[in-house]
Amino acid sequence: MTDIRRVGDGRYIAGAQWPRMHTFYHPIPRVYDSALIVESLRQATILIAHSMEGVPLGQVFLLPEMAVQALDGHSRDPSTPTNVHISLDVDVLQRTPRGPAKLHVKARFYVNGDCIATGTAGARVVDPSAYARMRLRSEAGDPPRPTIALPPEQVGQRHPGHVVIGESSRDGTWPLHVDKTNPIMFDHPLDHVPGALLLEAIRQALRAHTREPHLDFVSFDAAFLKIVELNDKADVSILPSKSYHNRTKATAEIRVDADVRVVLTCEFELMPEGSDGTLCPRHSDGPASGTHPVSSLAPVRGAGSTTCPQSAPAHPRVP
């Protein structure tokens, strides 16, 4: 994230910059990585809550639900970073004396004035003392079972440390492989498995299941029902899928024994034989009625109402 501006009651525009090359976020040629869209949505939700909606620093964020849909006909330029404008509508569903306790965020992602994706996120904001009491009820459990990570090329990664599922003898099911030294997933100490790792585990399981290492979500809707503990013996399962036209619809679950912790429904497209790695064309109705490309809005002058650091010249200031 590089900037944020208020444009109305509960309406904001945020700026972000996506790198042209990254050790973890490396989409297939010319197509935006859904994991980068998800991470930007997560960061934008937390940024708005703190800088615009009055959530004090130190509060704990839980994101129990998230959905993303990539729109058709857009491709990235691998020779330059991508400057992104994110249009955000925020509903505060519950307030406490300490500020908002429950939020719902709707986002639209624009590149060069074109909407390339949409997303929604639900957020719960928990006081640290309440979170500590909630975590006391969690079971420490035994150390996790040892797992051997799949080869990175099978799941679309270049580095073995970025593989988050292990080898399995069960068809359609893989053990979760958690490496707390991974600086992308664990850039600060955590007492549970982060949602980004769980989403990536499902994507990697789909890639292993279909033997398509460049597979990415066209859309997904995820519900995080319970926290996955660092010591949990969790499994990622791909349920029977349905195909229509050039798309496949699938459901995935992350379980600890018989207890379902995460459920995700998604759509994806398999690469046609002989493809150069780009996705097949998709059909879309374009941006929703009443929305406007971010680039058409007049620039906001002055200091603005943001607590973000000033952006470097190469990073976009939002109009």
Image (cartoon, grey):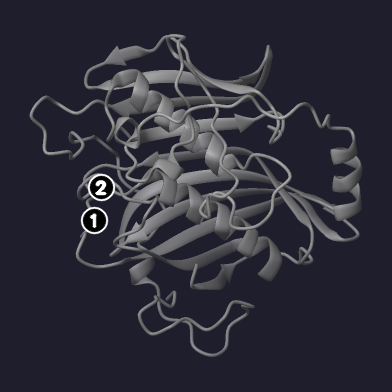
Circle 1 sits on which residue? 76
- Mark 1 is on which residue type? Arg
Q: In the displayed structure, does residue 64 sit left or right of residue 60?
A: left
Please tell me which residue is depicted at 40% across the width and 39% down the height of the picture: 69
Locate the C terminus and report the quarter of the image it occupies: bottom left
Tell me the tag on residue 31: 2
| Quadrant in which residue 213 is drawn | top left
Q: Is residue 52 visible?
A: no
Residue 134 in the image: state x and y as whole percent.
87, 39
**Vertical order, 3 against 135 (above or below):** below
- Name the secondary structure under disc 2: loop
Residue 20 in the image: state x and y as whole percent.
29, 62
Q: Residues within 10 Å of mark 1 (few under 14, many from 20)?
A: some
Residue 167 in the image: state x and y as whole percent.
44, 22
Please tell me which residue is depicted at 42% across the width and 81% down the height of the picture: 299
Q: In the displayed structure, does residue 285 sit left or right of residue 236?
A: left
Q: In the displayed structure, does residue 221 sit left or right of residue 283?
A: right
Residue 295 in the image: state x and y as whole percent.
34, 70
Label 2 close to label 1 by CB (< 8 Å): yes
Q: Residue 273 versus residue 171: which sits nearer the camera? A: 171
- Mark 2 is on which residue type? Val
- Name the secondary structure under disc 1: loop
**What's the distance in space between the residues labelled 2 and 1, CA to CA?**
6 Å
Q: Residues within 10 Å of mark 2 (few under 14, many from 20)?
A: some
